[in-house]
Amino acid sequence: MTTLVSGGAGYVGSHTVAALHEAGRDVVVLDDFSNARRDAVGELRRLTTPDLVVIEGDAADRTAVRQLCDEHDFDSIMHFAAHKSVPESFADPLRYYRNNFLSTLSLAEIAVERGIDRFVFSSSAAVYGTPDQLPVSEETPPAPQSPYGTTKLMCERILADTAASSDLRVVILRYFNPVGAHPSGRIGEQPITAGQNLVPAVMRAALGPLSRLQVFGNDYDTRDGTAVRDFVHVTDLAEGHVAALQADLGTHRSRVFNLGTGAGTTVLELVAATEAVTGRPIPCEIVGRRPGDIAESWADCRRAADELGWCAQRDLRQMLADHWRFVSCRADASPPS
């Protein structure tokens, strides 16, 4: 029982590798380290096994992936490797289409070629765009509003169509906003380049490298004027991936699941909760909305509960406390400001 995990040195990927190990599975990590730190591998090996196989390479490189398949008997693939910033995808859409599309196409082709029968895909709530109703269910028609969201939807369709015409079974996980870190404090969110995700920015403001937090819009039709999001602990997400790998899909060749908490938190509520956890003030500056941002989004997770036996176990305070423990103990843990 060996799983190939592309992007397994990254944020959600590394936590899922730890969860897979805990579930008794062997894991091989493939990562190009374009936005993951190599020193995270040592911490991941301390959490799992000293002989965890970690290969530096591109998931879109068919030759490299085929060589891995020659060396290991994979029965499943988990695909995390992707560019994932909504604002960045507007600035450089071709980079996003090339990377996200080609890596998925490569892994799907090799899965069919080698008879690998389970594929778990890391997708995103960004495929929904502005939902017609809340909470967002898996039946909500996808309408992505960014190149990033469009690439994820394209990849979902590649995998669903592949599953319909082969022996491959596909689980697509649309998760909302990952937060937190492993309870050991050994792994967490520390990308190479500074993204624009909210919680890392809030943490940088609490630590000091960021003088003030930019809040993108306070004129939304929400309870305090700021955007509402569903934040979910990264360990809960990792456990959701293990549940997806083990799930009985019945007659479904492919199946989509939302992973979130089912609760929405505004930006200002998140700031206040972080101040309570850290004991530090977080200065804020209200600026204009960003392209691709939406007012409100939180998940209907009943399908995951019914069919995967999964639901989020950790609340917002625990997410923020675990995230803070990780970044505050590492001088270089937060992305550059």
Image (cartoon, helix red, strand yellow):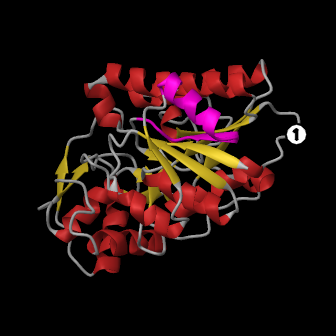
Q: Secondary structure at mark 1?
A: loop
* Near-viewer residue (85 or 218): 85
Q: Per the image, is 26 magenta?
A: no
Q: Residue furthest right?
A: 251
Specify the segment rendered in magenta: 60-82
* Image position, residue 276 (x, y; %): 33, 79
Q: Quadrant of residue 282?
A: bottom left
Q: Is residue 100 left or right of residue 220?
A: right
Q: From the image, tell me which residue sits under label 1.
A: 250
> What count of labels does the image hold?
1
Residue 281, percent across and down? 20, 74
Residue 286, percent from left and from top: 19, 52
Q: Residue furthest left?
A: 211
- Camera sees residue 263: no
Confirm whether residue 12 shows in the render.
yes
Position of 217 relative to 254 (above/below): below
Kindly identify the residue that appears in the image at 73 percent across and 50 percent down.
Answer: 1
- Image: 116 above or below 302: above
Using the image, determine if residue 167 lies above or below residue 238.
above
Give residue 110's position: percent from left, percent from top: 63, 25
176 vs 114, left or right, is: left
In the picture provided, is 94 more to the left or to the right than 335? right
Classify 10 Å Cα crowding around label 1: few (below 14), some (14-19), many (20 and above). few
Residue 10 or residue 289, whichever sits in front: 10
What residue appears at the point 60 percent right and 51 percent down from the top-left corner?
27
Outermost residue on the front side: it is 71
The residue positioned 26% from the left and 81% from the top of the image is 279
Q: Nearer the viewer, residue 233 or 261?
A: 233
Which amino acid type corresponds to the residue marked 1 in the rendered image?
A: Gly
Left or right: 42 with respect to 27? left
